[in-house]
Amino acid sequence: MTYLKKVLVAFLATAFAVITISGTALAQPKTLYETSSQHTITDGATLEHISRLTADGWLNIKVLRIDTTNPNIKIDTLANGRITDAFSTVLALAEKNGAVAAVNASFFNPMGGGTGYPDGPLVRGGDLLATAGWYNQNNDEMASFSLDNSGQILFNYWKNSLTLTGFNNASFVVAQYNQPSRQQYMDITVLDNKWGPSTLGASEKYPDLVEILISQGRVIEVRQALPASTIPAEGYVVISRGEQAVKLLESFRTGEPAKFTVTSNPDWSDLQMSATGSSILVKEGQIPEVFSYSTGGFDKKNPRTLAGSSQDGKQLILVTVDGRQDNSVGLTQTESAQLMQELGAYNALAFDGGGSTTMVARKPGTSSLDLVNIPSEGSLRSVANGIGVFSQASPAPLAKLILETEDPNVFVHTSRNYTLRGVDSFSNPVMVNPQQIEWSVRGIEGRFIDNQFQPTSIGQGQVIAKVGKITGELDIRSLSAPVKLELSSDKLEIALGESQTLEVTGYDQQGFKANIEPEDVQWAVSGEVKDFQEGTLKATTVGAGYIKAGVGDVHAYTAVSIYEDSTETIYAFEDDQASFQANPQIAQGSFQLSPDQVHGGNTSGQLVYDFFDTNSSGEVSLLFKGAGLSLASDTSELAVWIYNTRENSNRILGEVLDDTGKRYSLEIAPKLDWKGWQRMEVSLEKIKKPTKLRRLYVQASDPVEGSGKIYFDDLTARVVNHPVIDPSKIPQDSIPQDEANRAIKFVSGPDNFKFAVFSSSQESDTTLEDQWLNKMTSYINENLDMAVYTGQAISAVRDIEKPALITEAEYKTYNYKNCSFIQLDTSQGGLRRSDPEQWLWLFEELDNLAGSNVFILMSDPPARFINAKEGELFKDILAEYRQKTGKNVWVLFQGGGNQSELDRGVRYSSYAGFSIPDFSQEKPTAANYLEVTVMGKNITYEFKDL
């Protein structure tokens, strides 16, 4: 089977990845399952997507392989024009420079204002942009990836010598070039236009700064304690202070020669590009016993960006591994080294990882770049630099067609749109003229209107697009008419003036699904829903109603609420509606209307406070008259403008009453850490029906600043009006008829038998449950052949005389006649969490099962796996197994109700047992059991009263 081959290949690869680190045998987490796909980005560069389930969790791995000997490929560092330019994302850097793929590279150091500088030396396009003389001088710690002018890939610990020579050949050691000083400029720093347009200039922090401007090899100006100046276009500035500055002034005079040189190993003048990472992970095929750079974060699983090269030095391997996510746990530094070995790296290092880990690549047939990994912070981080891959091939004629569609499944007599892209012999995009495309289909019947296909028969086939003599094909499955529809939302809540689109998914009788184009759906609206066309609702009127979606005789419905938020001023601080309140033994102060600081109108509310004991949590209040300012019951938020005269850590709170008189304290500002006006908001979502705002108050929390003055103005309330429709007025969705849910006359035979399925969430502990379980046990003993319990151990099972299976914390297989019962352990929220070995065992069991029918027994359904991706994998595996073997596959589990549905031919059935809500002394028969009848390959079921 395909899936089993994938697992075994991955497992064998893992089995040999055992290494020795500091004398301890370590291995990568065992691979349980893996899928991969690969496509060419451009001639000489491919991208592989690897999704791997391991004993420790999922890994999302992306691998760029670049042939450095290919004349159509260029590799270079991506960086801003100047070091002091604001950081950019890898995507922005790649787009700006025309790269077809890129990853992030060096670690970097922020300098404020969104700027910063990369660690270590940086070479772009053969030009040295920045480096430091002290880098790796004492230890081989931070390694660099470089590409020399002959195309050789280098991984080594770069070492520099930066020298400044002046009058009488006086020589000085330069600490850094185009990087800020780490010694408060008491050393020597050289900056040129690759740093920025201006010198640093003297400042409050560095009032004694000496700057020597050098152009075309001669000193043109010596500056002491002067503002910033322009860096010479063909020169640089030498910066220092203290003792070093005194020595520089003795040796550098206006008009005299000066020379700055950088020598390095490797020789930077022989490099095309270079960027710094951290540890060398693999050196000449071996993993070091001790990594050169290691911190707590490197010993933990985190996102990683890695670079390696093949043994022959002809292939560059750039890798990202996502981390800190449920669907990709990340790697340790050791695991990163092992992965690079597995991927064929003979030498490798680690770049900056964590939230910086990013890979972008061009989608085949397009000129645009896509983000191909999933950054751990949920968005792209701005970084100092990256590694870019460029295509240098000249445009060529169309050589290949790439055919794509949103969903390869389509229902008969509905439509599906197709996109055709072209590439040349170098895999670079070529525009395709739609007028030149000839569309056809093979294996099924149907018709095309431009790029839209509508099948008129059921089955599997291929859609074919032809341009001249070049064709592209894509598999298609035409499904029978849907028996169930599912909308993308069962309730639309949309603000007035906004729009929202509904998507429709259909399911056929066997549980195969397909997206349905909006124009193939019969839409209808009811209630106050007005402007709705082909799946898109425009909220033009406040109100409630529902939307009906239909395909043939099958329908689905969704409730609609169009709401409008309103903001109203509840106190403008223009009239007397509040007074001062405080415990005179703790604090004093005053409140009055004041024109001193005004946000709106003519006055604001001035609150003066002075806490005697700053160690207490005393309060000074602005108390509103009566019971307080009235609030609408659907107020969702309060906002007030506050003017603060002095920063401190005291808090601002508000007190709201609900309709029962209960008081709620709400934090408006956790601290007064600003000066001037600021709008502060506080949510009332936790208060069901607010009625009054009783007071605003300052609470003492700053032991130093116990007194102050603040101003309040423009106090507003946000009211949300959400109309609702009575659910009873919305029709029910169409429910498909289950052909297996029926009574059948049982006939004895060698492969025929009947069994019961019942569910219980815990050991029976009530007389009522014991009574009915005993009756069920007696019934099974007298009438059935076996029993399955999908809950935990049940006491009545001890009296059963027939085979009985219970979904406990173990996994095993029980064969009975022509059926296999596979019991799985999902007690910890999934197969992997309960026991990772269970996955490999399941694959082997499926591969060796005899008989026609397979029943999978679990305490929880795949939808309740803690990791949703593992749940989807479980369903995919069973669907593939069902399709390849033709066997009946049933999954039996405990659930909140009695129901059964098909997913791609696999039946998933849940049973509530005693957990059904209506089960009681008065309604004991509300609890049902499932009676399954097996007659060869024909399986039917009925829900029956106990």
Image (tube, helix red, strand yellow):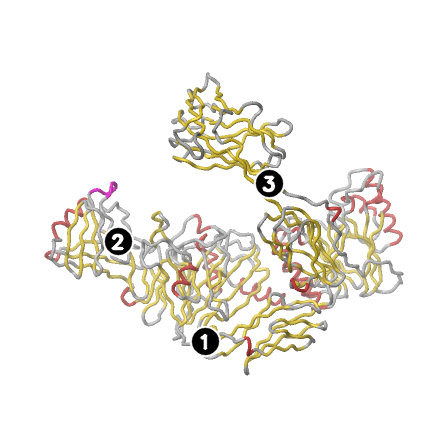
Element carrying mark 2:
strand
Whether residue 139 is visible to the viewer of this picture, yes or no, is: yes
**Label 2, label 3: how many angstroms apart (C-alpha)?**
59 Å
- The reply to whether residue 838 is visible in this rendering is no
Name the residue beneath numbered marker 1.
426
- Whichever of callouts 1 and 3 sits on the residue coming sooner in the sequence is 1
Find residue 555 and report its image quarter. Answer: bottom right
Alpha carbon separation for disc pair 1 and 3 = 57 Å
Which quarter of the picture shows residue 128? bottom left
Rendering coords of residue 675 (x, y %): 38, 35
Q: Which residue is mark 2?
A: 176
Task: Give the residue type at disc 2.
Answer: Gln
Tag 2 and tag 3, C-beta contact below 8 Å: no
User: Is residue 767 or residue 235 the one in the foreground?
Assistant: 235
Front residue of 396/433: it is 433
- Residue to which mark 3 is pinned: 720
- In the image, 686 versus 726, the foreground residue is 726
Of all residues, the one furthest to the top in this rendering is 585
| Residue for point 57% across, 72% down | 403
Q: Nearer the viewer, residue 241 or 235?
A: 235
Position above or below: 771 against 115: above
Circle 1 or circle 2, nearest the eye? 1
Residue 611, located in which quarter of the rendered image?
top left
Task: Label 3, secondary structure: give it.
Answer: strand
Which residue is pictured at 15% across the width and 46% down the height?
Answer: 246
Give whichever of discs 1 and 2 has the lower sequence position.
2
Kind of residue at badge 3: Val
Crowd band around label 1 with a 10 angstrom C-alpha radius: few (<14), some (14–19), many (20+): many
Q: Quadrant of the N terminus?
A: bottom right
User: Magenta region: which residues?
Assistant: 203-207
Q: Earlier in the sequence, mark 2 or mark 3?
A: 2
Q: Secondary structure at mark 1?
A: loop
